[in-house]
Structure formats: C-alpha cells, structure tokens
Image: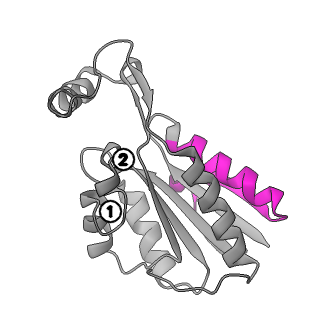
Amino acid sequence: MRILLTHSSRFGHTENIIHRVAQRLEEHGFHTDVRPVSAVRSIAGYDAVVVGASVRYGFFAPAVRKLATRLAGSALPSAFIGVNLAAAKPEKNTAETNPYVRKFFAKSPWKPDATVLLGGELNFDLYNRVDAAMLKPILKASGKPWGAGVKVDYTDWAAVEQFAADFAALLDGSTPRHPGE
C-alpha cells in the first residue's frame, strides 16, 4: 500500500511531524511518499493520503484547502494533522473545540477518516518582525514564554505515535473506517 504524506509547514516543524508518521507507517509495512502540499499535482497512484498543516495568521494555506477539496471527492482513506499553538491546550485539541480546525472543516467538504491536533513548536529565532509582533501579545497574555532565544516544542509526540498506529490499523483493516469522526 502506497501512502502520500503531505505537509504545509512554514518553519519545518509540521514537516518533522509528517516524517515521524511516515517512519512509523513504514515500520508497519507501508510504502510512504513525503512531499509538500504545494508539490502535489495528483493523488492518483496512492492508496491513502495524510495531510499535515500548520496554521498561519489564523488559517491553513490555500493549497491545503485545495487538496482537501480534492480528497473530498475521493474514496481514499485519509487523515489530517492540524498543527497550531492553541491545540497545546487540552480544551482546544479536538476538531470540535479548536477554532482554526473547526473553521477549516466548516468550509471544507472533506471528512478525513482520522484527525489529530498538535501544539507544534514556538521558535522565535525563526520569526521575522511581523510574526514575532503578532505572537508576542498572545503569548504574553497566556503566560507562555516569548522573545529572542525562546524555543518550545508543544507537540505531544506520544499522540503522534498513537495517531500513526491508529491510522496503520485503519489501513490494514483492523479498524473500520468512519470518515468525519
């Protein structure tokens, strides 16, 4: 079985998550192909698709929305990994409670078979002045660290591992498909 794992990652952390999932799926015997969402021209030839996307200025990239629309018209098993700092909070780490993911799925016909939300990484040394200025008041108000030199990984790596195992079980047929749940 050939799985496309695609990512929309501004600073590389979502790509790292996708590579970890790909590695775990390969350990389960699947063949994986990892590429940026912007490089995906077709999903033909794949047996399943995983989309990993980070939020930027409150939205997922247009290429993610476009791919989601294509996946909605496909019978392929699919999964979504949403990455945003809000998901680091337990009360905002589901598709129903996370404002960015809820907004994304409200406008998308795609209903993936599996979804996981992850907090991602905060790395101020990678941000330009605009990014830093946008994040500073949010982080300051929430009591999170901010400023030059700050690097914090809010990703629940155990959840990444569990997601990969669960999606592998879905693909090998040991777990039934329930798109949109």
What label does residue 68 carry, if any? none
The quarter of the displayed image where residue 108 is located: bottom left
Report the magenta residues as a range.
Answer: 14-40
Main secondary structure along the magenta-highlighted residues: helix
The answer to whether marks 1 and 2 mark residues whose Cβ atoms lie closer than 8 Å is: yes
Q: Could you tell me which quadrant the N terminus lies in? A: bottom right
Q: Residue furthest right?
A: 29
152 magenta-colored: no
Disc 1 and disc 2: Cα gap in Å?
9 Å
> Is 155 left or right of 142, judged from the image as shown?
right
Q: Residues within 10 Å of mark 2 (few under 14, many from 20)?
A: many
Point 43% across, 60% down: residue? 64
Residue at the (59%, 61%) spot, across then down: 163
Residue where numbered disc 1 is placed: 101
Locate residue 65, reporting x and y percent: 38, 65
Instruction: List x then y, in percent, for residue 119.
Output: 41, 45
Apparent side of residue 28 relative to residue 171 in the rendered image (left or right): right
Whether residue 36 can be seen here? no
Q: Secondary structure at mark 1?
A: helix
Q: Residue furthest front?
A: 90
Q: Amino acid at mark 1?
A: Val
Write the residue at 46% across / 81% down.
72
Q: Earlier in the sequence, mark 1 or mark 2?
A: 2
* Disc on res. 84: 2
Nearer the observer, 59 or 170:
170
List x then y, in percent, for residue 116: 48, 61
